[in-house]
Amino acid sequence: MIVSNWRKALMPIVLSVALLFSACSSKEPSKYATTQKETSGRSAPAAVAKNAEAGGDFNKFFPQGDAGFARVFSQEKKGFAEAKLNKGGKNVAVLSISDTISLPAAAKKYEKSTSKIGSYPLLDEAPLKSTGVLVNNRYQVKVASRDPSFTATDRQAWLSKFNLDGLSKLK
């Protein structure tokens, strides 16, 4: 009897020690922890370049709503502006202009473009259901479908409605 009581009393202690050591063992940091550390330090690069264009400066280059479509501005911040394109009360697409000075890779992908709208390289990202043009190797203008009825042809048509030439003169 005494031996079995001793084992019953020792078992929780052994389990507690095992849990303590397994919880304190070193693990590789998750990819999220590594990214957080890299981007939140004092020497981390800014998410938006200091000389990025103000988002409000882009608004005048967006097309107006027409033919049953309503344009509703939804977001504006330094280097970026976005508007939703609604039809019949339903969001069918998102229109955006972004300053790629903060993310040069966004502009670089247009180097492989073989299509154009006007004189601007066109890129259709079919898996993302978005189509964009690059203006002055700096400003990315995109239309992204949010409804299956809004096709790649629709996206290109709406891209051509932006004031791309006006945007190209933005300093």
Image (cartoon, rainbow, N blue to C red):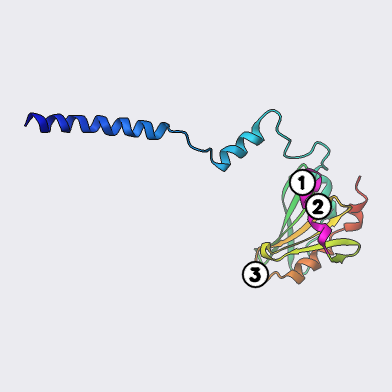
CA gap, disc 2 to disc 1?
8 Å
Q: Quadrant of the C terminus?
A: top right
* Residue found at x 73% / y 62%: 70
- Residue drawn at x 76%, y 64% as measured from the top left: 124
Classify mark 1: residues with Cα within 10 Å, few (<14), some (14-19) or many (20+). Answer: some
Q: Which residues are magenta?
A: 100-113
How many labels, in total?
3
Q: Which residue is mark 2?
A: 107
Q: What amino acid type is highlighted by mark number 3? A: Pro
Please state, as top left, top right, bottom left or bottom right, where the N terminus lies in the image. top left
* Mark 3 closeness class: few <14, some 14–19, many ≥20 residues within 10 Å: few
- The picture quadrant where one finds residue 77 is top right
Question: Which is nearer the eye, 10 or 169?
Answer: 10
- Of 93 and 137, nearer the camera is 137
What label sits on residue 148 in the rendered view? 3
Magenta span includes 42: no
Question: Badge 1 is on which residue?
Answer: 103
